[in-house]
Image: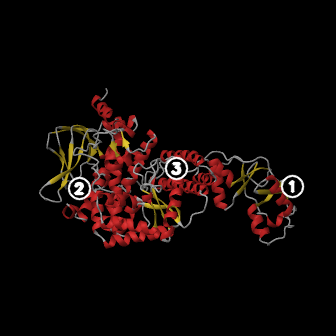
Amino acid sequence: MKNTISERVADFLKNYPPFNLLQKKELLTLSEQVSILYQEKNSFIFTDGEDPHTSFYIVHKGAIALHKASKRNANKSEIIDICDEGDIFGIRPLWVKENYKLEAIAHEESIIYAIPIAAFKPYAQNNENVGNFLLESFASNTANPYSKRHKGNLYTSNYSENITPEVKLLDLQPVTYSKKLISCLETTPVNELAELMNKKRIGSIVILKEGLPIGIVTDKDLRTKIVTGQYPITTPASKIMSSPVITYPKNMTVTQAQMAMMKSSISHICLTEDGTVNTKVVGIVSKHDIMVSLGDNPAVLVKAIKRTTKHKQIKVIRKSIMNLLQGYLDENIPIGLTAKIISELNDACIKQVIEISLKKMTTPPPTNFAWMAIGSQGRSEQLLHTDQDNFLVFEDVAEDVLPKTTNYFLKLAKHVTKGLNTIGYEYCPAEMMASNPKWCLSLQEWKNMVSHWIINPGPDEVLMSSIFFDYSLSYGDKNLVDQLSEHIFTTTKKYPLFLLHLTKGALQNPSPSGFFRSFLVEQDGQNKDFFDIKSRALMPLVDAARVLILSHSVKSISNTWERYEKLAELEPNNSEIYLACSYATKALLKFRTKQGLLHRDSGRYIALDKLSKEEKIKLKRTFKTVKEIQELISIRYNVANLLG
């Protein structure tokens, strides 16, 4: 006879994570052991300090409020979370043998399911996706999901940022090779060998003896052994060849070829019928062949970018960069690594746009200059095609030639910004671009501008500096950048009040959620009812990191999660929240990037009705961290009392 109650339980659980990750048979087995509890309004499920239960819970109907002791009043508690239908809570016993740190109280009349930990734990241990979800859920109340304290309590292996054993980092397609083999004998003089290589336009030649491979000569051998004078040009091939030749079977994969070249520090592989030197050579594979096979490999894309002569050619390559980004996300490559690679490729595009633009100028630059990326690109966090933000700084010149020098760089900047627009970067609506005379200045003019912002920190000045202070060198003289950075830190130390104003500016971003954990959406305009993930979630983290890193005078780190990781080193007592901020920033950026690629836009405004329950839960987890870092900087700089 069927257990209709357990089937109804399974029917409910299958709609919510992590139970939706279980097999149907597993879910039915688990549901038979689930208890159904009715909770009156204001009744306790567990209290702060209570011994851990043998079950954790999921809300079926109603709402459960999670309380913690108030920092301001020891006799009171404050609500830190509201769990509604499908939310899990009370999972601490899954991870640590500690008493509860929160109180769970029925916020309204509720029905909850108690999931036996003993019955559920094997599923979490055997299904890493289930365990990862629970780990992140637990992180909602432990600040940092990757803290040393909680790491590895459920798994025997270490947990890293969303990497699973199934991640495919290398290409497994068959390697392609040329079947038109060019060879010579061991007695062939090097001059004849070189003429043959030049005529056939090849970079290597196989040396045969009785039809079998005994060695190989490459361009490198000619450069290092003949051109240097080590051997005369009439030397026989046997004297300069690499021997014994390294051979592999013709059906090897791209991955195997890559690994073989790395292992033996070689740039060419000889393919034979059976993979040994005892059978006929069928072809040669070079590093270049491997790179071509990989197609969207970053190194290939950089080379392709450097070969371009027109902006439209770079635009085509940027589509490949987006394909690469999509592939990294599909393979669940850590977003930190993904951001570094995509940012390097974006920088390569910007550099080539500048190189092409310089060739359009009738004369070379009159003095040294630096092209700077600011905002998200300056932080190496711009993964999608968004608008361009940049400025240009040039070396100080005599006052009588300053107007002429400025005009030259403004003309260059207009070429560059137009080129960037051609390859996919929209013009900045606020005109924060080097083509704007306000953003194309000499070093001294920039120093004067920055000093004005710091000494007179009104709302506009704080806004400008908050954008400007996240910069990185895209092209040109690094010394100019270093001098400007030194000026910023020196001036900030002289005027510490500026940090208070910068903090106040950082706290202007609206909260991401309301009291009942509802998303606070836009109330009007074209994005009405959409959630603004940039201003409500990402920017509070970015702004707080900027304030804190400036206060420590840390130079050369502009990336937000790297700033938080550095802050965790500098302030060990706050390391937990800083590492949580690092994680939250990467999680939000990854979420925004996925949404942007899905909808082919910037990913900034999100339609909540299109998100799954699991996606909403993951997004909400970061909100607590946003709130905590804003509280930290508000208290540290006493913003309310000092600035009003």
Amino acid type assigned to the residue bearing label 2 in the image: Asn
Q: Earlier in the sequence, mark 3 or mark 1?
A: 1
Answer above or below: position of 462 versus 275: below
In the rendering, at what x and y percent does residue 532 appear?
34, 45
Q: Which residue is mark 3?
A: 418
Amino acid type assigned to the residue bearing label 1 in the image: Glu
Which of 534 and 450 lies nearest the eye of the viewer?
450
In-image side of 407 versus 193 (left or right): left
Quadrant hosting residue 229 = bottom right
Q: Which residue sits at x=80%, y=59%? A: 214
Amino acid type assigned to the residue bearing label 3 in the image: Lys
Q: Earlier in the sequence, mark 1 or mark 2?
A: 2
Q: Earlier in the sequence, mark 2 or mark 3?
A: 2
| Residue 629 at least partly seen | no
Mark 3 or 1: the one toward you: 3
Which of 642 and 255 lies nearest the eye of the viewer?
642
Mark 2 or 3: the one toward you: 3
Secondary structure state at the residue bearing disc 1? loop
| Residue 132 at least partly seen | yes
For marks 2 and 3, give the CA distance: 61 Å
For marks 1 and 2, give the CA distance: 79 Å
Q: Which residue is mark 1?
A: 210
Q: Which residue is mark 2?
A: 99
In this view, which residue lies farthest toward the front? 400
In the rendering, at what x and y percent does residue 554 appear?
39, 69
In-image side of 569 versus 290 (left or right): left
For marks 3 and 1, give the CA distance: 62 Å
Screen quadrant of the N terminus = top left
**Contact (Cβ within 8 Å) of mark 3 with mark 1:** no
Circle 1: is it few (<14), some (14-19), or many (20+) Cα within 10 Å?
Answer: few
Mark 1 or 2: the one toward you: 1
